[in-house]
Amino acid sequence: MELTIKYFGMLAEVTAIAEEFLQIEPCSVAQLVKQLQKHHPKLEDTNFKIAINQELVDHTHMINTQVEIALLPPFAGG
């Protein structure tokens, strides 16, 4: 399946891209993060959240359909 990966804020600076497309097999968010960290090693030292189709998810969430993934930098608010 093809995923659209979007990088926001400082994550776009760290990866030097705002968006990319990946072909992957179904996997968990944790597995996807490991793949992204291999492709962009600077992400290993960066704190971020993951959103799938504009909803925050945890690392156990399974990705098994074509979706939009957003990597979001830390943010504050209430």
Image (cartoon, grey):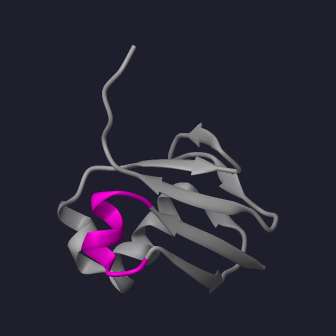
Residue 61: x and y in percent read 63, 46
Say which quadrant the N terminus sits in: bottom right
Residue 9: where, in percent of width, then height?
34, 57
Name the quadrant of the C terminus. Answer: top left
Residue 45 coordinates in the image, percent (x, y): 17, 62
User: Magenta residues, as a range?
Assistant: 8-17
Quadrant of the rendered structure where residue 33 is? bottom left
Residue at 74% in and 62% down: 67
Q: Is residue 13 magenta?
A: yes
Left/right of residue 78 with respect to residue 60 in the rendered view: left
Q: How many marks can you see?
A: 0
Q: Is the magenta stretch mostly helix, strand or loop?
A: helix
Which residue is at 35% across, 69% downward?
Answer: 12
Q: Which of 76 and 37 is in front in this view?
A: 76
Give me the residue at 45% from left, 77% from top: 35
**In this picture, residue 32 sits left or right of residue 26:** left
Kindly indicate the quadrant of the structure image that contains residue 40.
bottom left
Residue 66 drawn above or below residue 60: below
Specify whether residue 41 is painted magenta.
no
Give above or below for 33 relative to 18.
Answer: above
Instruction: State whether residue 15 is above or below residue 55.
Output: below
Task: Indicate whether 52 appears above or below 4.
Answer: above
- Out of 12 and 45, give the one closest to the viewer: 12
Percent position (x, y) of residue 64? 78, 63
Taking the spot 30% from the left edge, 41% from the top edge, the residue there is: 74
Depth order, front residue of 27/22: 22
